[in-house]
């Protein structure tokens, strides 16, 4: 089931990338993106009012006749409420007033705020029957984080598991917030973060001069820390050239090729301002390849690595196990496919959907290594 939902999300992601520029209204957003999400991803019949109720109405106090965009019914109870905004519209708590009002009245435990691409999932962790102000799960279909897929699966029709997702919601909420904070601090450290780190390495009074000095030092240390992590990967590749991860022998020529390729790509990755820019199109292509390969192996064995000349999809994060190479840097796009001897054949494609034509070859490549 996980592989199925992954593939369907990848397909919807490609649809969003291709069509979002032509969607101008909230109604069009619902028809083009939200209804397919409910139907194809979650598995509910959008044309069956016993499963999906559009324009759901439940009178709230003096507020009469207000409607929520969709209510999903499971086991004869409203379980999920969905409020939609126009594609690209920012989502924040100010856009969720109707969800707040309907949450307790409808006795739903899950509320969803979406613009057709980003989905924010809420429950009632802070107070019973009152929707939280912060989501416990945030997902962007066009930039999918694979770690959210197992949680999303719990809301699908076939395996609906409300208790499980509610039990996991608190951890998901705080882990998600911590990841976003860490990412922001690594990109642009704020005064509190600088002060926190400075106090652990500087023993004197933290004056304005010290704060100014350490502001630059923290940024430099962060950059060097990230580069060191990449260099550690390079050292591991250089030190492990005689064997593969499954302890099978590797010829000296294969090992040299492996180390040289790893050195070039990792050095590129570590360089500052190296010109590598991972595009949304490359991410979408990766998601499609990953979705296809997931029918044969676990998703957590599939990795991505961008270089200046191509975007690589790897098995076990191992350069000697390429699954595909996405060559999207020119007007003509190509997907690089590999045979049993790891010879690459470049196939031209015009749209990302054409990757599915090579599904059998991609699945065969997986078995060359396993």
Image: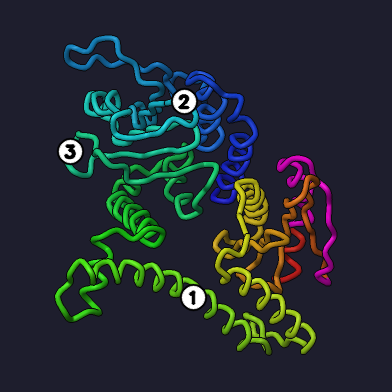
List the residue tagged with mark 1.
229
Closest to the observer: 250 or 368?
250
Q: Secondary structure at mark 1?
A: helix
Q: Residue furthest left?
A: 205
Left or right? Give the position of 173 relative to 244: left
| Image quadrant occupied by the C terminus | bottom right
Q: Reading the chain from its start, which is encountered first: label 3 or label 2?
A: 2
Q: Secondary structure at mark 3?
A: loop
Residue 344 x/y as whole percent = 82, 64
Q: Crowding at label 1, few (<14), some or many (≥20) Cα neighbours within 10 Å?
A: few
Q: Crowding at label 3, few (<14), some or many (≥20) Cα neighbours within 10 Å?
A: few
Pointer 1 with pointer 3, Cβ within 8 A: no
Residue 103 sits in which quadrant? Answer: top left
Please tell me whether residue 41 belongs to the stretch shown in magenta: no
User: Is 208 situated above or below 295?
Assistant: below
List the residue tagged with mark 3.
128
Mark number displayed over residue 86 = 2
Task: Let me know if residue 324 appears in the view.
Answer: no
Residue 4 x/y as whole percent = 59, 46
Closest to the observer: 178 or 80?
178
C-alpha gap between disc 1 and disc 3: 43 Å
Q: Reading the chain from its start, which is encountered first: label 1 or label 3?
A: 3
Pointer 3 with pointer 2, Cβ within 8 A: no
Which residue shows up at 22% across the image and 13% down it?
Answer: 63
User: Is 299 situated above or below 45?
Assistant: below
Which residue shows up at 66% across the image and 59% down it?
Answer: 296
Residues in magenta? 341-362
Foreground disc of the pair 3, 2: 2
């Amino acid at each position: 089931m996980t592989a199925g939902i992954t593939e369907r999300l990848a397909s919807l992601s490609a649809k969003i990338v291709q069509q979002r520029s032509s969607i101008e209204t909230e109604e069009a957003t619902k028809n083009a993106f939200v209804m397919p999400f409910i139907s194809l991803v979650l598995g509910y019949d959008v044309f069956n009012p016993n499963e999906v109720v559009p324009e759901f109405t439940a009178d709230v106090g003096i507020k009469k006749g207000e409607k929520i965009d969709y209510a999903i019914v499971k086991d004869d109870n409203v379980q999920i409420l969905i409020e939609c905004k126009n594609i690209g519209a920012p989502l924040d708590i100010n856009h969720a007033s109707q969800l707040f009002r309907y949450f307790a009245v409808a006795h739903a435990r899950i509320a969803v705020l979406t613009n057709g691409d980003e989905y924010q999932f809420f429950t009632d962790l802070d107070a019973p029957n009152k929707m939280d102000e912060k989501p416990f799960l945030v997902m962007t279909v066009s930039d999918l984080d694979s770690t959210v897929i197992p949680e999303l699966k719990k809301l699908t029709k076939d395996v609906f598991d409300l208790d499980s997702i509610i039990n996991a919601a608190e951890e998901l909420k705080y882990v998600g917030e911590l990841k976003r904070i860490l990412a922001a601090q690594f990109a642009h450290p704020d005064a509190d973060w600088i002060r926190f780190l400075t106090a652990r390495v500087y023993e004197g009074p933290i004056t304005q001069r010290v704060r100014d000095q350490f502001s630059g030092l923290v940024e430099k240390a962060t950059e060097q820390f990230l580069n060191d992590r990449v260099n550690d990967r390079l050292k591991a590749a250089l030190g492990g050239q005689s064997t593969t991860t499954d302890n099978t022998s590797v010829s000296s020529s294969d090992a040299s090729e492996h180390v040289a390729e790893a050195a070039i790509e990792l050095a590129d990755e570590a360089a500052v301002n190296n010109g590598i820019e991972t595009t949304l199109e490359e991410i979408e292509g990766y998601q499609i390849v990953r979705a296809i390969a997931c029918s044969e192996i676990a998703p957590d064995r599939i990795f991505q690595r961008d270089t200046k000349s191509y975007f690589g999809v790897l098995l076990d994060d191992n350069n000697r196990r390429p699954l595909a190479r996405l060559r999207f840097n020119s007007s003509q796009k190509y997907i690089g496919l590999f045979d049993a001897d790891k010879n690459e054949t470049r196939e031209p494609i015009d749209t990302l959907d054409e990757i599915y034509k090579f599904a059998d070859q991609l699945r065969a490549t997986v078995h060359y290594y396993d």
